[in-house]
Amino acid sequence: MADRNTPGAEAEREKSKRVGALKALFPYIRPYGALAGAAVVALVLTASISLVMPMAVRRVIDNFGTEDGALLDRYFGAALAFALLLALGTAVRYALVTRLGERVVTDIRKAVFARVLALSPSFYEKIMTGEVLSRITTDTTLILSVIGSSISIALRNALILLGGIVLMLFTSAKLTGLVLLIVPVVIVPILTLGRRLRVLSRENQDWIAASSGTASETLLAVQTVQAFTHEDLSRAGFDDVTEKSFVAARKRITTRAVMTAIVIFLVFSGVVGVLWIGARDVRAGDMSPGALVQFVIYAVMTAGSVAALSEIWGELQRAAGATERLVELLTATDTVTDAAAPVALPMPARGRIGFEGVRFAYPTRPEVSALDGVDLVIEPGETVALVGPSGAGKTTIVQLIQRFYDPAEGRVTLDGIDLRDMARDDFRKAIALVPQDPVIFAASAADNIRFGRPGASDDEVRAAAQAAAADGFIAALPEGYDSWLGERGVMLSGGQKQRIAIARAILRDAPVLLLDEATSALDAESERLVQAAVDRVSADRTTVIVAHRLATVKKADRIVVMENGRIVAQGTHDALVAEGGLYARLARLQFTDGLVET
């Protein structure tokens, strides 16, 4: 069900090649430079205190046998003071870094959502909504972990590593040289296994997204799944994708565990060897016991930093893959974009629609012409019905009027202006739509109708519902217009959803009204009421009606008959019936043969 979104189908995507992909996060961190700077100051402070502590330990050990108790008291007092500063600095660093992470991830989520919300329908022909949601949630959670924790820990350990090496040199250049010999041995497994970890991290995230996409698609169609007793197959499909996600995660975890084990073993083996040599130097009198303890502490701190950095490296790899996936959304190319200097639609809009030599094929079916040389002019205030068999191009006309797609040839105009020359937000405000499959949001009945015009008053909402023959059933709901309609309107029948959508379009009060099979789900009584409302509403605005049921378009000013993406006839109902041809045949099937009652 989600084949197009599985990692195998996404082979064309560039894999994460380097942690440097995280630099794409910098533009989101830059506005909070002061917060990041304060976090860095706290981080440097805590790292510096950690590096000073072993010096105090050396002093205590080397002076432990002296009779000056006051000196020891001062050393222990200083240690407590350092511990207090370390605790306060760590708390401040945690608070600042965590806040920074939450703030940056919030901005990223908002930016990604704003971007995908603006992308044209052609984008969603190539990617599942569930995968987009997975990127907004799962991938940003990974980035939150990195910004709010991993980067801070990595920087702290990097400072301790560098500072520890420098202080080790001052303590004992000989032992430091021995420790540094271990470094190349440690770096080799990090680089070798790190490359493998990058690939596995990205693969794991891809499978998680595929799993989310499969679940989203199935749950959105849960009634159809249940009606066709497809639960077992759907469950098996989801289980398969989820298990593959687990297998990829297991490989990633195993690789990371092996890398961590190798690094820790090599580092601490080296520390033990160096400690053995240092102990011999103490016995020979070449080194004080305090200096050896100080060196060992620095060596342990340095080794711990290397181990921590190797572990964090895996987190950075995963975050780099997540960042790349989010960047793919933020930089996704769209076939429909606004002009650099858009032309304003004159207000009030008249609603004159023009198609001039329009040819168009959907991006996923480029070999099939949805529209083939369409020329059509719809005058202001005219009601035009588009009829024809399925796949004739009727709904495509409606989609191009809203500029969900751009024609391959020709142009679509509103009031004489090419839609491509205007901002989409500008001219779409002059259009109201009633789709064939009405969308009901998880909100109240009033809010669903008010979606057409957010600033409308309660009285205006009620008037729109009355005009759409929806007031009766809404008033009968438990809380009337404040009743919650559930996700996708699960509490409503198909006809009730359609009347809510019609009320929404009526409330919008736009000069252009698009009705795509707007009465297809209504019973005879509701259809009669809604048809009367549509007749009233369309009297002073340009109306385009897409219909299979010819009874709903008999009163249209003009009927445009389409077949195979072309206009084959135009005229009134009576003229087209008298003319014969496709429309007369459709009318005969629906009226004469009684397939649809008039």
Image: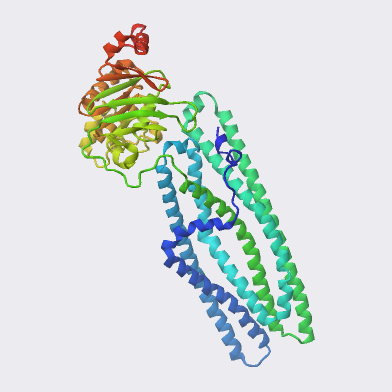
Q: Residue 567 versus residue 424: which sits nearer the camera?
A: 567
- Residue 435 in sight from this viewpoint: no
Q: Quick one: which residue is furthest to the top in this view?
A: 592
The quadrant of the image that shows the N terminus is: top right
The quadrant of the image that shows the C terminus is: top left
Task: Return the x and y of residue 442 as percentages of the image width and height.
Answer: 37, 38
Q: Residue 105 versus residue 571: which sits nearer the camera?
A: 571
Task: Return the x and y of residue 380 as percentages of the image width and height.
Answer: 23, 29
Task: Return the x and y of residue 551 as percentages of the image width and height.
Answer: 30, 15
Q: Would you place residue 331 above or below residue 559 in this image?
A: below
Give the tally of numbered discs: 0
In percent of the image, x 45 and y 29: which residue is there? Answer: 361
Q: Using residue 371 as the reference point, say whether residue 578 is left or right of it.
A: left
Q: Using residue 168 as the reference point, say whether residue 578 is left or right of it.
A: left
Task: Return the x and y of residue 357 as percentages of the image width and height.
Answer: 36, 28
Q: Would you place residue 562 above or below residue 143 in this image?
A: above
Q: Would you place residue 464 above or below residue 343 in this image?
A: above
Q: Quadrant of residue 425?
A: top left
Q: Using residue 216 as the reference point, say whether residue 316 is left or right of it.
A: right
Q: Quadrant of residue 156?
A: bottom right
